Image (spheres, grey):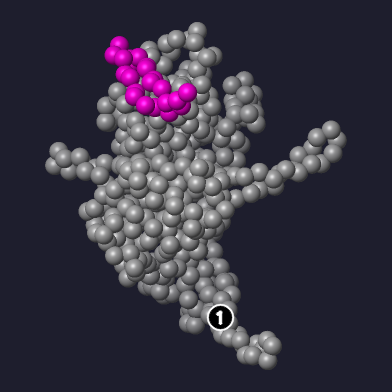
Amino acid sequence: MSGKKKKSTKSSEGNSIVLQEIDGNSDSGEKLLSHMEAYVKLVRKVNEKDLINRFLESLVGDPIPALHEDVDDERNLSDASRRLRIFIETTLLTDVIQHRLENASERINLLCDDSGSQIVSSLLNLSDAYEKYLSCNGVGRFSRALYLFLDQEYPTSESLGHRRFEFAESKQSLVHQASQVQTSCLFMGPKGIVPRFDEGIRKKMIDRLSSLYPQVKKDDVVIETYKTFDVKESEKLVDLVTWTVTFNGKHERFQFVSNGTIEEIEQSTASYIRFNWSVSRGTLAVFCEDFEHSSELAKLFLDIGFGDSVDTSDVSIWEFDLTGFARSEILTRLKTLRIDGIEGMDIRSLTLCKPEIKSFHMNGREINRRVENALVIKRHRYEERDIYEVARKHHRLSDFSGYVVSQVKLGIRMAKTKSRSAHSVSVQMSRPNGFSQECHTKEDSALILKQLMLVGCARQI
């Protein structure tokens, strides 16, 4: 018996939409909404369907009858079928509404990392019956973050009226400033070219990945592709291409108590690789947990996606030149060189290294090794002195002679837009090409990179 079957869902306009050859276990989010990656992820993660319905109807401004049809058959619908219905209804919305849904979903998803989830949970009012229910372990972090967003942006008569979602975003930014975040590695490629992707490329990608990750089964690799469009002179052009690769790449041990005894289980957990290709800038951001594989993964993407149109024998990197931060003159550049959309920048922390060559003997041979001991200079958010004055007063460093700046953290104030109030973000740059892209929305990342180029922190080599 074939695993493929037809899916039919009735739209809000009364038209019947039939999807041919859709996998019965799939919600087809990637195929139906290939330009709405964040929204597809959010719908898949939220396990409270009433919140998703409210999310859609709030942004549309009107009820969507199809989301509430066939209530008697709801128990017989699988989770994938419910999501499929939502995705089909989303395809019927205007481009403007879809864009707003995607932007909102991106902000909600970013607030669902470990630190953001704890902040959101702490803001729930346990004296309220529904918020107490949301605080239960069975309710996911994405549901809680979505609820706070709706409570702030689309309050009901029972809402508390507090701007808790924005407060959580601000607090999360402070946590990012005080801690290390995983960074993407930036590489260069040909501008203006959209990478190819089809079933043959999918199989080729999995085959190449198996050589880097031999422990991963080919059948357990899931690849999804998304595209973001930009409208220029009434023409819709692809601006950003995203490939996400998910597989069972690691094992974790969990302890639990059963019948009064402590037991332990080992379970495979998912790892993921993310490729973000900017068509207009010609930049490739590679995010993976195995940092040492980033260059190989960049070559893999460029080779498979562009074929013979690009030489992948020597992949150029988008380098962050941090040498300017060794001198206080950079503060003037940060204040005077400013693009539209950026209201302010300041240096939150600098990580310095003093490279030394250490010699020792092993088995009668002299071994030389490069040693770098890190010195972290941090500036508190309430500190009025700049980072260099803090270095002089507290670390007794009149200058950074002999040191190499290996990492910089900036606090950047983003200007108000039509869809979002002014807000602060934490930006981490690591030598040579590490950038905290996964912590920002796509729009913020594009502005930040443009600003860093103007200041002279980013360059192609």
Q: Secondary structure at mark 1?
A: strand
Residue 17 location, quadrant: top left
Q: Position of residue 242 (x, y in %)?
A: 36, 46
Frontmost residue, 271 versus 443: 271
How would you rate the neighbour count of disc 1 (Cα within 10 Å): few for under 14, some for 14-19, many for 20 or more?
Answer: few
Residue 451 on the magenta span: no
Residue 215 is at least partly visible in this image: yes
Residue 339 or 398: which is nearer the viewer?
Answer: 339
**Residue situated furthest left in the rendering:** 233
Q: Residue at x 68, y 86 (%)?
A: 362
Q: Is residue 272 above or below residue 376?
A: above
- What residue would you read off at disc 1? 370
Query: Which residue corresponds to the image point at 57% horizontal and 53% vertical from the top-left?
Result: 215
Q: How many marks?
A: 1
Picture layout, residue 126 above or below residue 269: above
Q: Amino acid at mark 1?
A: Arg
> Is 268 left or right of 67, judged from the image as shown?
right
Q: Is residue 124 left or right of residue 450?
A: right
Specify start and end residues of the magenta stretch as a single range. Answer: 1-24
Q: Is residue 4 magenta?
A: yes
Residue at 39% x, 20% y is: 7
Q: Is residue 232 above or below residue 295?
A: above
Q: Position of residue 92 (x, y in %)?
A: 30, 23
> Quarter holding the C terminus?
bottom left
Residue 10 lies, in percent from the top left, at: 35, 14
